[in-house]
Each structure stands twice: as structure tokens, then as C-alpha cells.
Amino acid sequence: MPGPLLGLRWQDIDLDAGTLTVRHTLRVGTAELAEPKTERSRRTLRLSPDVVAILRSHKARQAAERLVAGTRWQDRGFVFASPFGTPLNTSNVTHAFQAALERAGLPRQRFHDLRHAFATLQLEDGEELAVISRMLGHANFATTANVYAHVTPASLQRSADRMDSILRRRIAGDGA
């Protein structure tokens, strides 16, 4: 579920420093903030310049929504909020996500599967398991390795190619 995203408030983001701190999660089916599940879940993440630019643009759009809403705006500081500043409903977010996948011609998946995709893509591109685990807020590397990081055909091929390279260097080093 998108709880940590929906619980994100502007005070948790430092656009100038390019950081985002996970401090809360939105309880499913409520408008209440809760503490993340574990100590490791409370973490500060670095944001890429592209994400910072997108968030700046989003903040400007939200300021315009605030003006339109006028006195109906409920200033709770949510980054992802309704046109009236209230927290988004997790079911509505899930339905919107499914609709976006369908429009893009992508297979149906759970919102939570984005975490799996993140871990797999990062590993496939050579990121260290420890870094991925920290970014996902896992208490230990085993969770990341066993549950989130999926081996892909591309990573298997890269491993085979790497072994070829290792053997070639060894043979060349032995004078053969």
C-alpha cells in the first residue's frame, strides 16, 4: 500500500538539500498518521535532481489548488493531497494506479510491487544490496535479498559474461 507516500508532508522534504525523510505512514482507510513499522523504516533518502524538479512543480500546482479551494483548504501539509488538502484515500490511489497501468498498456500489479521493481532494477544496474535495503527501509539485508530483489534474465546473462571475463583474464595472466 502507498502508506508512506500518502503520509509524506512537505516538512519531510528539503528540496534545496535534495532529501526526503520518512517519518510517518498514513493508516489504511483513515486520515491518521502512524509511526513506520521499524526504526529502519524511519530514514532520510537522497533525491535525484529530476525528482526534486518534479516535486517543485507539484508544489506549485498544489499552491494553485489551495487558492482555488480557498477556505475549504485543510492545511495538513500533505505532499499528496486531495484538491482540498486532505489526505488521499488509499483505495482511490490504488484504483488510479490500476487505471494508469491500463492506459500505459502495462500489466495489472499491486502498488506495493513498485518496491519490488525498484529493488530489482537497482540490483540489475549494479547497486549494492546494502544501499537498496537502506533505501527500502528494511531491518536487514535478508528481507531485501529474499523478498524484493528478483533475479532477471539480464542479470543472469551479465553473471555469465562476467565469468567469461574472469576466466579470460586468468588464462591471459597464466601466459597461456
Image: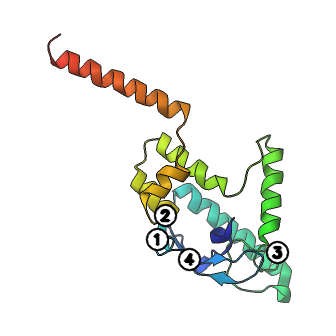
**Which quarter of the figure has residue 152?**
top right
Q: Amino acid at mark 4?
A: Asp
Question: Which residue matches tag 1?
Answer: 40
Residue at image position (57%, 55%) is 50
Q: Contact (CB < 8 A) between labels 2 and 1?
A: yes
User: Where residue 37 sits: x, y (%)?
Assistant: 56, 74
Identify the residue under disc 2: 138
- Which label number is shown at residue 12? 4
Kind of residue sitting beneath label 1? Arg
Q: Of circles 3 and 2, which is in front?
A: 2
Between disc 4 and disc 3, whose residue precedes? Answer: 4
Label 2 vs label 4: CA separation?
19 Å
CA–CA distance between discs 2 and 1?
Answer: 6 Å
Residue at mark 3: 83
**Mark 3 to mark 1 CA distance (whole Å):** 32 Å
Q: Earlier in the sequence, mark 2 or mark 1?
A: 1
Please state which of the two labelled residues, at mark 1 or mark 4, is closer to the viewer: 1
Q: Nearer the viewer, residue 29 or 74?
A: 29
Query: Which element is circle 4 on?
Result: helix
x and y percentages locating residue 39 in the rendered image? 47, 75
Q: CA distance from mark 1 to mark 4?
A: 16 Å
- Residue type at mark 3 is Pro
**Circle 1 sits in a helix, a strand or a loop, which is it?**
loop
Where residue 27 appears, as percent x and y from the top left, is 70, 77
Q: Residues within 10 Å of mark 1 (few under 14, many from 20)?
A: some
